Image (cartoon, rainbow, N blue to C red):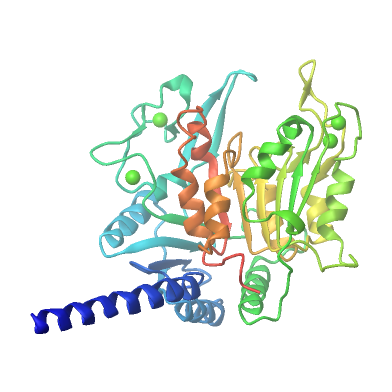
Amino acid sequence: MKKINKSLIVLVLCFIFIGATIPFSLIYFGRRQPTQSNLVHIYVNSTIYSSLSSDIAQYKQDIETQGYTANVINWSINGITQLKNHMTAAYSNGLIGAVLIGKLPYAKARYWDASWAMYRHFSCDYYLMDLDGNWTDVNANNYYDVGASDNNIEHNNGTADWFPEIWVARISPYTISKVGFNPLNSLNNFFNRNHNLRIGLTYRPHQGLLYIDDEWASFATEWVSNFTAYTGVNLTCESDYNYIANDFTNSTHFLSNISDITHPAFMNYELVHVMAHCNGTEQQFGINVYQGVPSADDGILTYHDIYNSGPQPLFFNLYSCFSSNLMITNNIATHYLFDGQALVVIGCSRSGGMSLYQPFYDSLRDGKIFGEAFKDWFYGPEIIPLNHWEEVYGMTFLGDPLLTIYMT
Ligand SMILES: [Ca+2]
Ligand SMILES: [Ca+2]
Ligand SMILES: [Ca+2]
Ligand SMILES: [Ca+2]
């Protein structure tokens, strides 16, 4: 009996020890380090591979310092299917996500836009994220027909599920077309900025801006309550519920907010979530349609404005239709990523954006990397019941998915 009691005491002490130490270590390390599989693929377009070799080597080292395993792959195949097959094979070996650097293939999709009586064509990175669902181009038109009006016949659970297995991100300035713009310099600049954040040379206070233009402003209270990564004194919310021209939330006011470097209290926002209409290359503030014509009566923010002003925040979430459509030259999301200080830009390549976003911000708040938080959003319990499933096809991640909102 005495022996048993002794063992029990040791066992109990062990549990107390584990109970006391594991939660602490999870809290301490959970922000930066993966807990399960940790394999990340970095695909680099072969034509720029050697030019970027020192940038990529630094990036690989930075990721490995976080506790991930990073495989750098020199990629030269144009087919999207081969790229996906490569990821699918790696998934069984623990692949959690992929970063695509430079010009690399993307899947194309389309949906019927009833309000404009036309098909919308868009790049679809969800194709690379859902590795075990069934994607079939049934009508052989080279587009995945993934709209409600086509009954979404070309993507379904298959023998597994409809949801994403991995996150996928792109770091590519090759949709930018501006006189004098040099994509290689731009990539080099991106990786320098990224490393500078990781070693503490870049600082942003933990401040978030939630900018809600007219169309969505009536639900401002709900948007704020779901924006869980930034609350209280860490949150600035600008919203205006007045359907009048040039009201308080307008393109000039927004641009000054994201490009101000003289703010007395802080250097600018860490993260900005903006809800404004967009046609792909320009964000149109104000109500969208008046008698069938886009009005944009609160001003237009073009990609030239982004290019010329160089936005200061590190992370952007653009609830702006078509903003990240890689089929559009000078899509504004790519400009956001490369024209200023940004390291993450989430956009939508079709109509919509990241609505019902609480799962994303909960994960960011909890210290998950952006890629994981992005993937978590797809599993949000409200997306299918509230009929927002079409939007998932447009969600696009530009920038570095290994960052968190606690880098500085
Ligand atoms: Ca098709
Ligand atoms: Ca799946
Ligand atoms: Ca207005
Ligand atoms: Ca407004």
> Where the N terminus falls, by quadrant?
bottom left
Q: Position of residue 129 (x, y in %)?
A: 41, 50
Q: Is residue 375 above or below residue 74?
A: above
Q: Position of residue 301 (x, y in %)?
A: 82, 44
Could you say which is closer to the camera, residue 42 or residue 199?
A: 199
Ligand 2 rendered quadrant? top left
Residue at image location 56% in from the left, 58% down from the top: 364
- Furthest residue to the front? 1
| Quarter of image, res 298 | top right
| Quarter of image, res 117 | top right
Residue at image location 91% in from the left, 67% down from the top: 264
Q: Is residue 55 above or below residue 266?
A: below
244 left or right, relative to 356: right
Residue at image location 25% in from the left, 60% down from the top: 92
Residue at image location 57% in from the left, 45% down from the top: 358
Could you say which is closer to the camera, residue 370 or residue 23?
A: 23
66 left or right, relative to 232: left
